[in-house]
Amino acid sequence: MKSFKSLLYTINEQNAPDIALRLFRFQAEHNPIYGNYIRHLGINTSEVSTLEAIPFLPISFFKSHTLQTGRWTPETFFTSSGTTGLTTSTHAIADLGFYLKHAEKCFTHFFGALDQYQIFALMPSYLERSGSSLIEMLKHFINRTGTTESGFYLYNHDDLARNLERAKKSNRTIILWGVAFALLDFAEKYSIDLSGHLVFETGGMKGRRKEITREAMHEQLKQCFNVSEVHSEYGMTELLSQAYTRGGELFYPSPWMKIIVRETTDPLEKGLVSKTGGLNVIDFANFQSISFIETEDAGKLNPDGTFEVLGRLDNSDVRGCNLMVE
């Protein structure tokens, strides 16, 4: 596995297929759950020669199994949020420090160094539970900014409003990063002009407000904060890499993840482009757990590698993620 860690940041468009196939064969041999799944499908690993032919493990396996490639002792566990009574996902993490550095690398690939920002996080639904990978990521980002105002604000909107106004006087760009319902609650109480700064939303209403489309929610936030665009992050408990929008609806995957779209009626039929289907993710950073994940999200892959997230597939439970009702 050390060889895959050393290869991770050498991945590019040309060598990604070869590295993915090498990683597939390694995980098929050293991840017992994945290996059993492949054998159950009757697939001969030696005959898999394209990305589209790689079998992807349904994401629901994270709810019932500990997915590890090789033998190692987990340092921590990430857990998903979910509706009361539903089984949630658990992702065993070998090295928390690696995850934090990698998440930073994904962010800086799109937005530059963290020390040029002040980050104000409004994440009440995530802070009120344990095991959130997003909270760990934002804690790290906040620490890396090196500013005293950056931090989590939970429900103390008065302090948030006051510190946002103060932060506007500095030469750093503000990022207001929050779950959708919390951002809307805050925006309705305070009129904060964040023109020239950034707003990131990272989820739906989570039962706190009426569900609306992401597009409608973004329009509200743009008007409330006087910004021309709202950014979104595509990440989840089961992934170590993230994709981001640059405003608008298109997600750009970081260089260490690859999106493949499958036919919804036949999960083994993959490689759809410009057609709606189920999203499969290759996350190269998951080399110690499982890199080939069949998600329960519906989406569309564009020829340039960007992708759209169109909601949840039928019969999948609604989890605490960044998807809105479409």
Image (cartoon, rainbow, N blue to C red):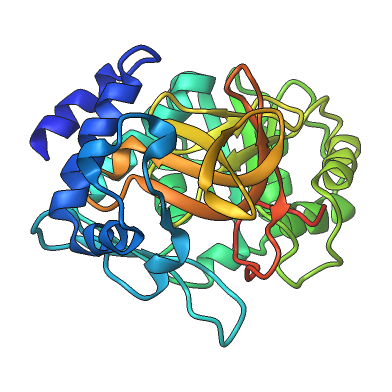
Q: Position of residue 91 (x, y in %)?
A: 34, 62
Residue that appears at 44% across and 21% down? 113
Q: Position of residue 242 (x, y in %)?
A: 48, 38
Q: Residue 208 falls in which quadrant of the image?
A: bottom right
Q: Nearer the viewer, residue 112 or 242?
A: 242
Q: How many marks?
A: 0
Q: Quadrant of the N terminus?
A: top left
Q: Residue 146 falls in which quadrant of the image?
A: top left
Q: Is residue 194 left or right of residue 58?
A: right
Residue that appears at 24% across and 47% down? 44
The furthest residue to the top? 14
The furthest residue to the bottom? 85
Q: Is residue 206 left or right of residue 239?
A: right
Q: Is residue 232 left or right of residue 228?
A: left
Q: Is residue 309 left or right of residue 256?
A: right
Q: Position of residue 88 (x, y in %)?
A: 47, 74
Q: Nearer the viewer, residue 28 or 79?
A: 28
Q: Nearer the viewer, residue 165 or 215?
A: 215
Query: In this rendering, is residue 16 above or below 230?
Result: above
Query: Does the image show residue 96?
Result: yes
Q: Position of residue 206 (x, y in %)?
A: 70, 67
